[in-house]
Image (cartoon, grey):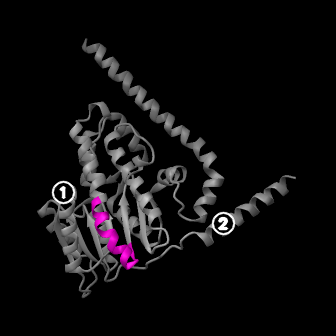
Amino acid sequence: MFLYILSLFVILLFILFVFLYNVLDKKIVYKDLKNRHVVITGGSSGIGKAAAIEAAKLGANVTIIGRDLQKLILAVGDITNHCKPYSGQKIQYVILDVTSDYDLIEKCLKKVESDVGPIFMLINCAGMCICGEFDGVDVKVLKQMIDLNYFGTAYPTRCVLPGMKKRNEGIIIFVSTEAALLGIYGYSAYGAAKWAVRGLAESVFMELTGTNVRLTLAFPPDTDTPGFEKEELTKPKETKLISGSGGLHTAEDVGKKMIQDALNGKIYSVFGFSGHLLSTLYCATIDGPFQIIVQILSLGLLRAVMVVPQLSFQKIVKDGLKEKCLENSKDK
C-alpha cells in the first residue's frame, strides 16, 4: 500500500513538473554581454563596482552612476583595466542622485542611451543601511532609507522599462537583502525599504510575463564593502550577533554571481546556505519547475529547521534586554 501511494505521489509530481515546464515562460540565457550596454547605479564602489567589473569582463559597454566624482573617476579606471584588449568598449560615469527628481533621472538616462546605446541591463545597486531600534531611529533616517533604497531602484527602473518592453529585450537586477526575507532586529528602517524593493520586483516580474524582458531579484548577505563598514557603526550589539552568523562575503563574489544568475535567467539570486534556505521558504514567485518540486517536498521540514535559528535570535534579543535593564538599575 505504501509503495502504491509513493508511486502515485511521484507520478503526480512528474505530471506537475511537465505541466509547469510547458506553461512557464522559458528562461532566456545569455553567454556574455558583448557590445551590450550595462548601467549600474551605485557603481563606484562595493557590489556595484564589482558588478561593473564583471560586466566589463563579459564585453559590455558600462555606465556607472554615483554622486562622488572622485570615486567615479577611480572606479572607471579600475573597470577599464578589466576590458578585453582592443575591444573598443566604452566605460563611462555619470554623476546623478537617484533619489532626485524623476524627470532629471529620466533625462539623464535618455542621454546615456543616446551616447552609448540602448540599455540592455540595468543593475540597481544604489543603497545604504542605517541600523537601530525602530523607536530610536531618527525619522529622517526612515525617509532616507525609503528614498535611496526604494525610490533609488523604482525611478531608474521606471525610466528604462518602456524601452526594454518596446525592444522586447533586456534584464533588470534589483538588489535587495536577506533582511527582506526575514524581519531582523535593528533592520526595521532598512529592511522595510528592501521589502518594498522585493514587492516591486515580484510585481514587475508578473507584469513582464510573456515578454522577453527579464528581472532578477538578488538577496545579498553581509558583504565586505565600504557601505558595510559604515553600517557596522550603527549596528546594535544584537544585530551584529544575529547577522554575523551568516558570515561575510566578498563584493567580487556577490557581484559576479548576481550577473551570472541574471544571464542564466534566474529570478532569484541568493548566496550561501542561509540564502537558499530563506528563499525556498519565503519566495513565492515561480522560478521554474524544479523550485516548485523542492518547495513541495521540503517546506515543512525547512520550516522546522528555521525555528532553531529564529529561537536563537530571540534569545540574543532577550539577553540584550536583560543587560540593558541591569545597566539601568546600576545607574540608578
- Disc 1 residue type (three-letter): Ser
Q: Earlier in the sequence, mark 1 or mark 2?
A: 2
User: Of all residues shown, which one is farthest toward the top?
Assistant: 332
Q: Judge the density around disc 1: few (<14), some (14-19), many (≥20) Cα neighbours within 10 Å.
A: some
Which image quadrant for residue 68?
A: bottom left
Q: Name the spot of residue 198 as percent of width and height, x first.
A: 41, 54
**Marking on residue 17:** 2
Q: Nearer the viewer, residue 71 or 213?
A: 213
Q: Name the spot of residue 136 as percent of width and height, x first.
A: 27, 31
Q: Nearer the viewer, residue 237 or 60?
A: 60
Q: Name the spot of residue 201 as percent of width and height, x first.
A: 41, 58
Q: Is residue 114 left or right of residue 307?
A: left
User: Of all residues shown, which one is farthest toward the right?
Assistant: 1
From the image, tell me which residue sits under label 1.
100
Q: Is residue 80 above or below residue 7?
A: below
Q: Is residue 330 left or right of residue 260?
A: left
Magenta segment: does it hold 44? no
User: Of all residues shown, which one is farthest toward the left?
Assistant: 70
Marks 1/2: CA–CA distance: 46 Å
Q: Nearer the viewer, residue 209 or 286?
A: 209
The prevailing secondary structure element of the residues shown in magenta is helix
Q: Is residue 291 above or below residue 118?
A: above
Q: Nearer the viewer, residue 158 or 129?
A: 158
SS label for mark 2: helix
Q: Residue at x 28, y 63 (%)?
A: 156
Q: Which residues are magenta?
A: 155-170
SS label for mark 1: loop
